Amino acid sequence: MLFCIILLSSLVILYNMNINNKNVDDILIKKIIGSVKSKKTLIFMDDRFITSEIVKFLSNHLKFISKLENEKSKEFEAVVKHVRSRCHDIYEIFQTRDVEKRDLLLNNIKKLTKENAVPILETHISTKERLPYYETLYKDIFGLIGVPNSIFDIGCGLNPISIPFMESAGLKLSKIRYCATEMSLEDTNFIGNFFMKFKMESEVFPCNIVKEYGLLSKYPCDVCFAFKLFDVLESQEENISYKIIESLKCKYLVASFSMKNIKNQKMKRTSVSYFERFLTKLGYSWSTLSIENELFYIVDMSSKKS
């Protein structure tokens, strides 16, 4: 029997902090986090990320700190607005308003099929957009790289739930080892519960990839999926994608990029220049394929030129 191994950090967030010699107590930080996450599409946002954004903002607005006790003050509202904006750019844009339904949907599934996976996949923007294409997409990918026995899905969102579509493309559920990371602990728990329910051999762990990309090297695999990930990470730290690619221990990397901008407008994007620059510098070869609104790079990580 295969077992699901869920590697969840025992996260203890230390809210008491000193920001440029000004103390900010835990109750106040918790209030700000609560206000940020009171928005329905941010309820599963990672507390660690929110805390770090609060600290960054207040470090540049020290005068705000003394006014934050009043939750109706313009200073308090400014902090919440700024942090929500940062959360929107890296997380909220992928969430639907049905995100709260996913636990119930998972509980109601008795057998893992494409039909049963669809309602859960519809609670995430990216997986919902891929639904008409998933089966063909995986057939095309596996046609290029072979059917994998191990997958590492970084910044996975709900993509692991699409595994029934991978089965239609030749993947054997009884043979696959599926590792996954996501920034949000709540999202990580959900994916872990999914793997456990269907007794898949797996490892799931929360990871802020920008700060913890070194962890990725511990998970060798046949293929690493990084769907709609690198644009988001580059918005947080320029050139971080290079460090991440360099850290991966996989035979193939399949990375995708949205062909719509943050305002949901279609872009004339036929290539991703910064990504190709990194691949060229690292000596990797690649091919591309696309579906509506998404461009995929299939990178041969064994092709590195000496």
Image (cartoon, rainbow, N blue to C red):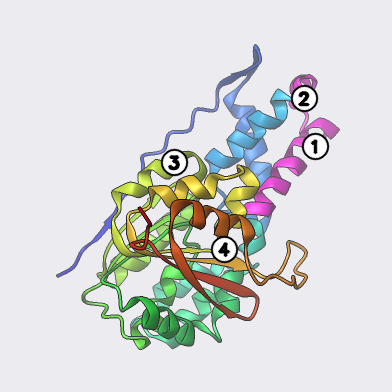
Q: Name the residue: 42% across, 78% down.
A: 141
Earlier in the chain: of badge 1 and badge 3, it is 1
Q: Give the spatial CA distance, label 3 vs label 2.
A: 27 Å
- Dot 2, crowdedness within 10 Å: few (<14), some or many (≥20)? few
Give the quarter of the image for residue 263.
Answer: bottom right
Which is in the foreground here, disc 1 or disc 3? 3
Q: Residue furthest right?
A: 74
Mark number displayed over residue 212: 3
Q: Name the residue: 68% across, 53% down.
A: 89
Quarter of the figure that contains the N terminus: bottom left
- Dot 4, crowdedness within 10 Å: few (<14), some or many (≥20)? many
Earlier in the chain: of badge 3 and badge 2, it is 2
Kindly identify which residue carries mark 2.
61
Q: Where are the magenta residues, as a range?
A: 62-90
Earlier in the chain: of badge 3 and badge 4, it is 3
Secondary structure at badge 1 equals helix
**Amino acid type of the residue tagged 3 in the rendering:** Glu
Kindly identify which residue carries mark 4.
228
Q: Nearer the viewer, residue 236 or 71?
A: 236
